[in-house]
Amino acid sequence: MFGFGKKLKPLEVEVVSLPLDILAVGRSVMTTEKGLFMDSQLVAERFARLLPEITDKAYPAYDITVTYHPDEAGEFRYYMGSCVNSEPSTPIERAEIIRIPATVTCAKITVETKSVASWPVRQGKARQLFYETWLPASGMKQHSEIESIEMYGAASRWQTPSMDLYFPLAID
């Protein structure tokens, strides 16, 4: 069933450290703002082909997407993966491994939706809150490499799906 009758919690920003060291196995693509929609589908297909080979998944289980800041030409890396406890003992063809330490300080927004189909709209509102309101008022700056981390755990499949959106911050 869907959570259409449920009232969603308001979007709020809190400053936290990542809940765990991120060690993930997945795939990425270089893309642009204009190409992201099509390229995100491509990387999702590539990642899905890796899933049967990914073992030793972290508990609690998280799938993540990581968006990096664009270069001068406007291209950026878009990564999709599963968090694991350790690197694969045998290499997985075409798999990419990323590490992000839990010591990274982030602005976190928990994004709830009434259905998975409405995630893009709610995520857009969360990003708008972060970039247009919270970041300018905070006086903080973003991390130099990573723009955002989306963490999808078990709650992303519940009646009222939710995910955590992290914006890494530059801490002096």
Image: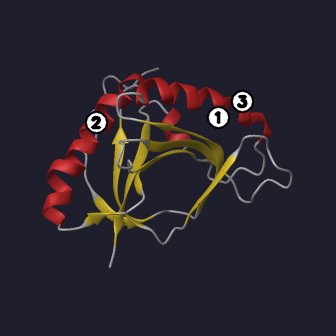
Image quarter for residue 49?
top right
For label 1, the SS is helix
User: How far, Cα to Cα, is label 2 from label 3?
Assistant: 28 Å
Q: Amino acid at mark 1?
A: Phe
- Quickly name the residue at label 2: 124
- Residue at x-position 46% and y-position 30%: 159
How many C-alpha atoms fall within 10 Å of the one at disc 1: few (<14), some, or many (≥20)? many
How many C-alpha atoms fall within 10 Å of the one at disc 2: few (<14), some, or many (≥20)? few
In front: label 2 or label 1 = 1
How many C-alpha atoms fall within 10 Å of the one at disc 3: few (<14), some, or many (≥20)? few
Task: Examine the rendered structure and indicate whether residue 9 appears above or below residue 7.
Answer: below
Among the two numbered marks 2 and 1 on one chain, the one whose residue lies closer to the N terminus: 1
- Quickly name the residue at label 1: 47
User: Do the CB atoms of the residues marked 3 and 1 lie less than 8 Å apart?
Assistant: yes
The front one of 75 and 128 is 75
Q: Where does residue 103 sit, x and y in percent of width and height?
A: 48, 72
Task: Examine the rendered structure and indicate whether residue 57 appears above or below residue 101.
Answer: above
- Quickly name the residue at label 3: 49
User: How far, Cα to Cα, is label 3 from label 1?
Assistant: 5 Å
- Residue at x-position 82% and y-position 49%: 91
